Image: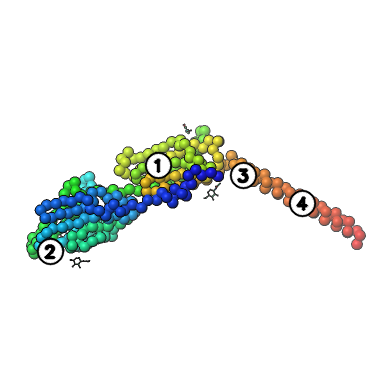
Amino acid sequence: MIFPIHPALLLIFGSVIVESQTEETNICTTEGTKSLCVSREVIGLRGEDVTLPCRFTHEEESDMIALRVLFYLLTSSNKHYVYNSSSNYMDESFKGRIQPMGNASEGDGSVRITDLKMEDEGTYVCRFEWKTSLTTMDGFQARKGMQTQLRVDVRPEILRIWKESENSTNAEKLFCEAEAKPEPNITWMDPLGRLVELSGTMVGPDDTNQIQTIIISLNLTSQRPTGNYTCLAENQYGVVQELFNYEVFGRPSKTRHVLWTVLGGIIAAVALVALMAFACKWRRNRVKGPAR
Ligand SMILES: *[C@@H]1O[C@H](CO)[C@@H](O)[C@H](O)[C@H]1NC(C)=O
Ligand SMILES: *[C@@H]1O[C@H](CO)[C@@H](O)[C@H](O)[C@H]1NC(C)=O
Ligand SMILES: *[C@@H]1O[C@H](CO)[C@@H](O)[C@H](O)[C@H]1NC(C)=O
Ligand SMILES: *[C@@H]1O[C@H](CO)[C@@H](O)[C@H](O)[C@H]1NC(C)=O
Ligand SMILES: *[C@@H]1O[C@H](CO)[C@@H](O)[C@H](O)[C@H]1NC(C)=O
Ligand SMILES: *[C@@H]1O[C@H](CO)[C@@H](O)[C@H](O)[C@H]1NC(C)=O
């Protein structure tokens, strides 16, 4: 068998670990001696962890008592109060998934969000609050346009691989359904490891900011070899594959045909030998019998 691209190689080199870029703080909101710096964009993967950096500095540090950090999540319709470092409050949807990465009392309000969900995507506003006396409060937050955009991407995953036959024509088709974000490249490989031209592709939804689900099909004509068909799905985070064993009933593969012929031959030969042995023994017994 020839494999122009061996799928196992793709699996080894295809996996990418993301994170890194998230640590830097590259946009700052500044006012007088106060400054608050965050990352403009952070990309995380569904089910994995991500860090939202937020650092606050103020020259009159001695005036700040009980410094704490708060996070708000802005979605298209709402503003959710998500986290409070001093009470360790977390919104219901983030229960147990936000961890402080620095000491907020010292101005490091960076947090880690674990086990990312698609719903976590949005704009995060970092806000510091402190007391200036027993009764008065002050605060400072990242200004609009200087906030953190969290994007949640998805590694490719094959959801389903199946065969369907059309009632009227008896034509058979293989289907493969995969999801990823951004949209995955998806292909079929035949049992000889050759890339196969697709017979059809369905993509959805139209909004490319969402998880893209793709279904590809392959017409199984009589020219197609039987054996394992491989569906491959790939985006920048990795490549996955799934096999479908295509062995048609009523159209036995050549090897199966040969196998049955050989097996039939062996059974016939064994039966013949047994019959001959029995015949010989019977004849010997008949010869010996009367001699006694
Ligand atoms: C954060 O927690 C502190 C201490 O529990 C509380 O005083 C403060 O009001 C909380 N902030 C918000 C915005 O709820
Ligand atoms: C955070 O910093 C404050 C002030 O420097 C200090 O008192 C406190 O112990 C620190 N907390 C932790 C968990 O390190
Ligand atoms: C295929 O045939 C079966 C039985 O003949 C019928 O119940 C079924 O609805 C048909 N399916 C389609 C897609 O025509
Ligand atoms: C696959 O089969 C369908 C009919 O089921 C046909 O319309 C289509 O043209 C075929 N595609 C290819 C690439 O052969
Ligand atoms: C198809 O794949 C299955 C499972 O990996 C394997 O056991 C089988 O030997 C393969 N068949 C062929 C013809 O390569
Ligand atoms: C997907 O395929 C297109 C065209 O073949 C190629 O330009 C692109 O780099 C591929 N993307 C990935 C993630 O493999």
Report how far apart the C-alphas of labels 1 and 2 lie in the structure.
54 Å
Q: Earlier in the sequence, mark 3 or mark 4?
A: 3
In this rendering, the answer to whether 89 lies above or below 199 is below
- Picture quarter with the C terminus: bottom right
Q: Residue furthest right?
A: 291
Query: On the image, numbered disc 3 is attached to which residue?
Result: 256
Residue type pointed to by label 3: Arg
Q: Nearer the N terminus, badge 2 or badge 4?
A: 2
Residue 47 falls in image quadrant: bottom left
Task: Write the residue at 68% across / 46% down.
Answer: 262
Q: Of label 1 and label 4, which has the lower sequence position?
A: 1
Q: Is residue 216 left or right of residue 81?
A: right
Does label 3 or label 1 sit earlier along the sequence?
1
Label 2: how many Cα within 10 Å (few below 14, some 14–19, many 20+): some
Residue 204 visible here: yes
* Element under disc 1: strand
Residue 47 position (above or below residue 252) = below
CA neighbours of label 4 inside 10 A, class few (<14), some (14 to 19), many (20+): few
Residue 185: numbered disc? 1
Label 2 is placed on what type of residue?
A: Ile
For marks 1 and 4, give the one nearer the viewer. Answer: 1
Of tags 3 and 1, which is closer to the observer? 1
Q: Earlier in the sequence, mark 2 or mark 3?
A: 2
Q: Which residue is mark 2?
A: 65
Whole-number angstrom distance, CA of label 2 to CA of label 4:
100 Å
Figure quarter occupied by ligand 2: bottom left
Q: At which x and y percent is residue 83?
A: 22, 57
Residue placed most toward the observer, 25 or 199: 25
Rendered image: mark on residue 145 = none
| Mark 1 surroundings: few (<14), some (14-19) or many (≥20) residues within 10 A | some
